[in-house]
Image (cartoon, rainbow, N blue to C red):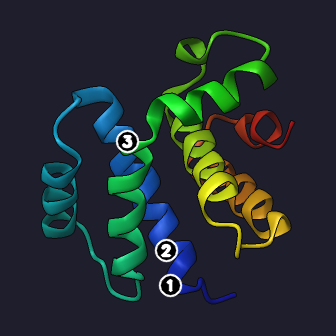
Amino acid sequence: MKKGSRHKAREAAVQALYQWQLTQQAPEQIENHFILDHEMNGVDLEYFHHLVREVPRHLHELDDHIAPHLDRALGEVDPVERAILRLGAYEFEFQPEIPYKVILNEAVELAKTFGAEHGHKYVNA
C-alpha cells in the first residue's frame, strides 16, 4: 500500500519531535536539519512544518490533556511513544477537520513503525 503524503509527514514529524525532545534545540533548527538529512520525497512538507512547529508550541497544554490518561508519569513514557502521543493529541485538539478514527489509526501505525515492541498497544489504550 502506498503511503500518503500526510502519513509521511507524520512519520517525519515523529522523528523530528523525538529529536527535539532529546536535544531541546529550537524546532526550526531541527526541522531544517531533518529536511537536509532525510529523503522528503512525497512528504507533505507544509504539514510536516506545521506539526514540528506547533506541537512544541502547545506542549504544556498537550501534556495536560495526555497525563490523566496514562498509567505512569509522562516523563516515564518511552520518548518515541511520547512524541506520537503528543502529535496525536495535537491533531485531536487543533485539527478538528481530521476524523478521530484517522488520528487514532495514524498514531497506532506510527507506534508500530517507530515504537517499542508493544508500543502500539500502549498508544492505542
Percent across and percent down for residue 116 are 63, 34
Q: Residues within 10 Å of mark 3 (few under 14, many from 20)?
A: many
Percent across and percent down for residue 108 are 74, 53
Front disc: 1 or 3: 3
Q: Amino acid at mark 3?
A: Pro
As helix, strand or loop, the secondary structure at mark 1 comes to helix
Going from N to C along the chain, the mark reached first, 1 or 3, is 1
Vertical position of residue 3 compared to residue 100: above or below = below
Q: Is residue 31 left or right of residue 87?
A: left
The circle on residue 5 is: 1
Q: Amino acid at mark 2?
A: Lys
As helix, strand or loop, the secondary structure at mark 3 comes to helix
Q: Quadrant of the N terminus?
A: bottom right
| Residue wearing tag 3 | 56
Q: Is residue 46 left or right of residue 86?
A: left
Q: CA distance from mark 2 to mark 3?
A: 19 Å
Q: Circles 2 and 1: CB distance less than 8 Å?
A: yes
Front disc: 2 or 3: 3
Closest to the observer, 78 or 26:
26
Q: Amino acid at mark 1?
A: Ser
